[in-house]
Image (cartoon, rainbow, N blue to C red):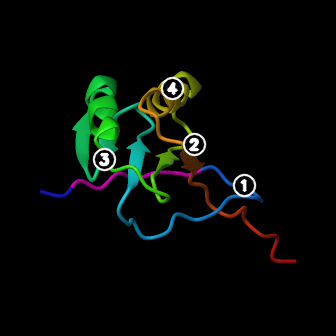
């Protein structure tokens, strides 16, 4: 079963689009309502921490955090805290490029 979340990612000039997931890379999605999912599966923060603790150690070990621009800041910070507690050394925030002025 696949779940699709309609996210409105915040723009950032220095953002880097997420690459295709490889071993050691976990993409965590947080909806505007604060629901945390990995691969479409809803997780509590405790379940997320358990999952991240099992990520194989290696140079590619990282989390890509994709949070809707309307997500409460406290929820994003809580997810970031879980990532740090799980010992994941790298975390990227997924953004979209800012809209360009057509003129």
Which residue does the numbered mark 1 point to in the structure image? 12
The CA distance from mark 3 to mark 2 is 18 Å
| Crowd rating for badge 3 (residues with CA inside 10 Å; few <14, some 14–19, many 20+) | some
Q: Is residue 30 above or below residue 103?
A: above
Closer to the chain start, of discs 1 and 3, is 1
Which residue does the numbered mark 2 point to in the structure image? 69
The CA distance from mark 1 to mark 4 is 22 Å
Residue situated in front as seen by the camera: 87 or 82: 87
Quadrant in the picture for residue 102: bottom right
Of all residues, the one furthest to the left in this rendering is 1
Where residue 61 sits in the image (x, y, percent)? 45, 52
Where residue 85 sits in the image (x, y, percent)? 46, 26
Residue stretch in magenta:
3-9
The CA distance from mark 4 to mark 3 is 16 Å
| Crowd rating for badge 2 (residues with CA inside 10 Å; few <14, some 14–19, many 20+) | some
Q: Nearer the viewer, mark 3 or mark 2?
A: 3
Q: Which element type, helix, strand or loop, lies under badge 1?
A: loop
| Crowd rating for badge 4 (residues with CA inside 10 Å; few <14, some 14–19, many 20+) | few
Quadrant in the picture for residue 12: bottom right
Q: Which element type, helix, strand or loop, lies under badge 3?
A: strand
Which residue is pictured at 38% across the width and 52% down the height?
26
The CA distance from mark 1 to mark 3 is 23 Å
Which residue does the numbered mark 4 point to in the structure image? 81
């Amino acid at each position: 079963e696949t779940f699709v979340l309609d996210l409105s990612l915040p723009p950032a000039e220095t953002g880097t689009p997420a690459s295709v997931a490889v071993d050691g890379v976990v993409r965590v999605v947080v909806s505007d309502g604060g629901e945390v999912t990995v691969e479409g599966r809803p997780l509590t923060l405790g379940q997320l921490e358990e999952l991240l603790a099992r990520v194989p150690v290696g140079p590619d070990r990282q989390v890509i955090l994709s949070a809707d621009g309307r997500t409460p800041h406290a929820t994003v910070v809580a997810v970031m805290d879980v990532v740090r507690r799980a010992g994941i050394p790298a975390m990227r925030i997924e953004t979209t490029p800012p809209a360009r002025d057509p003129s």
